Image (cartoon, grey):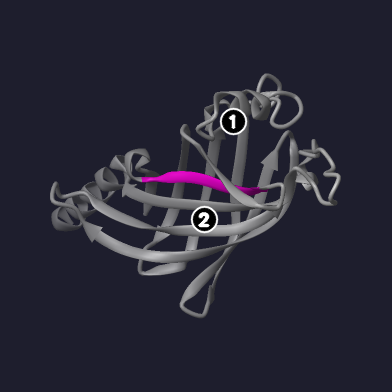
Amino acid sequence: MAWTIDNAHSSVGFVARHMGLSKVRGLFTQFEGEVDGDPSDITTATGSFEIDTASIDTASPDRDAHLKSPDFFDVENYPKITFVSKSVERDGADYKVTGDLTIKDQTHPIELTYEHGGDIQDPFGNHKVGGSLTGTIKRSEWGLTWNVPLDSGGWLVSDNVKLEIDLQLAESKEAVEQEVAAEEASIAG
């Protein structure tokens, strides 16, 4: 089955440490993606995801402007971040999702943990599936190397960035139309 991201009920977030002291959280507010697979067998899932880098929001306009600059995401030259899954494997109660993450035209494999939330029919008759993806990346591997050394040692911004992605997917209209056509064809048979 084909599924599309329900943006109204999904979020793409990240967490970085500031001076090693506090966690600074941010979101990308514009994203889209599709997943193909059977919700009763998560290991069949394949998907792709695209994020608009200019949609970054850390609740600080000055910090957001810096993150959009060439020091970080360089949104003028690299307007998109993409992720394409390669495999999904069961890992205890959760799943291990591996795929290719592209930031600033640099692609590297990453591994995320997927916690399945389940699948259900909503009150409006729509088939939904959802869950959470988490993982940690080293931003420097994608050329996001801007930093300031601290007099006490360490760095202003952590190299490790935690990804926190919560997704709700809706069965695509095309898949529903195909299923109805297939059912009608089998009945006409």
Image quadrant where one finds the C terminus: bottom left
Q: Residue furthest bottom?
A: 92
| Residue 96 is one of the magenta-drawn residues | no
Lateral position of residue 151 relative to residue 60, left or right: right
Viewer-side residue, 89 vs 187: 89
Q: Where is residue 154 drawn, in percent x and y?
A: 82, 51
Q: Main secondary structure of the magenta part?
A: strand
Q: 175 or 49, which lies in front?
A: 49
At label 2, the amino acid type is Thr
Considering only vertical position in the picture, is 126 above or below 69?
A: below
- Residue 162 in percent (x, y) is at 61, 54
Residue pointed to by mark 2: 46
Q: Earlier in the sequence, mark 1 or mark 2?
A: 2
What's the magenta region? 10-17
Q: Is 167 in front, or is 40? A: 167
Q: For the residue labelled by badge 1, is the local secondary structure a helix, a strand or a loop?
A: helix
Q: Residue at x 71, y 55 (%)?
A: 109
Q: Name the amino acid type tagged 1.
A: Thr
Residue at image mark 1: 53
> Could you tell me which secondary element the residue under label 2 belongs to?
strand
Q: Decide if residue 26 is on the left or right side of residue 118.
A: right
